[in-house]
Amino acid sequence: MKHIHKSISLICMSAFILSACADDGQVYKDKTNKGVGIGAIAGAAAGLVLGDDRKDVVIGTIAGGIIGGVIGHSLDEQEQALRGDLSKDATIQNTGSSLIVTLPEDVTFDTNSTHISRNFKPELAKIAANLRKYPDTTVDVIGHTDNTGSESFNQALSADRAHAVTSILTQKGVNSHRIASYGRGETSPKATNDSEYGKAQNRRVEIIIRPEA
């Protein structure tokens, strides 16, 4: 037990040191630093589980931190490229381990339709070009709705809209094997369904981009 407590303290200390090193000289941005910290802790934990002394923990921490930093830096670069290409209609969130591109229903689709709006197709072409530029990622395309109508209808609508977005991406050259497409209907709202504004926020398609492990 004493050995485990020491190792856990070493994990935290090593992760802090690696993150501080990443801050030095502003080599990486905030999300890169987060990736360093996450990778360091994961690597250290692996060293603790698989190894039998503090050396294994340190090696795991360093290796995990390096991998986490590389992933975070790559996401930062991809995020900036997307922000430079896309209009303000699509929002981008960098979590440190993934990019979440949110496409609002009112600009992405024709009214009461699963067909992509003609005006939005160039935006999807830009997203496809970005995904081709950064091929070492996986992509989840997830449809969402508000709670208007039946659950079964909303589930089918969300899946169809996710599939419509996926079809455009693959037509523009993104490898279909990288993409998983599905709908969540009304089950994952991001805002209240008690107002029209909230409902509009919930009607969306999310493209979640993750670096391959």
Image (cartoon, rainbow, N blue to C red):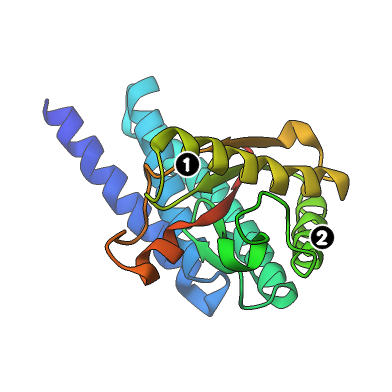
Element under label 2? helix
Residue at 81% x, 38% y is 175
**Which quadrant holds the N terminus?**
top left
* 74 horizontally vs 118: left or right: left
Q: CA distance from mark 1 to mark 2?
A: 26 Å
Q: What quarter of the picture does the C terminus occupy?
A: top right
**Percent from the top left, x then y, of residue 196?**
37, 69
Circle 2 Cα neighbour tier, 10 Å, few/some/many (<14 / 14–19 / ≥20): some
In the rendered image, residue 152, in percent from the top left (x then y), is placed at 45, 32
- The residue depicted at 53 percent of the width and 56 percent of the height is 204
The kind of residue tagged 1 is: Asn
Residue 77 position in % (x across, y down): 67, 66
Task: Identify the residue shown where x is 33% and y is 61%.
Answer: 191
Q: Nearer the viewer, residue 208 or 7?
A: 208
Q: Nearer the viewer, residue 77 or 147?
A: 147
Measured as percent of width and height from the top left, residue 15 is found at: 36, 52
Which mark is on residue 53?
A: none
Residue bearing mark 1: 154
Q: Residue at (39%, 62%) from the top-left corner?
A: 199
The residue indicated by pointer 2 is 125
* Secondary structure state at the residue bearing disc 1: helix
Check the image and name the residue furthest to the left: 2
- Circle 1: is it few (<14), some (14-19), or many (20+) Cα within 10 Å? many
In the picture, measured across the screen, residue 150 lies left or right of residue 24, that is left
- Pointers 1 and 2 in contact (CB under 8 A)? no
| Looking at the image, residue 29 lies above or below residue 58 | below
In front of the other: 213 or 102: 102
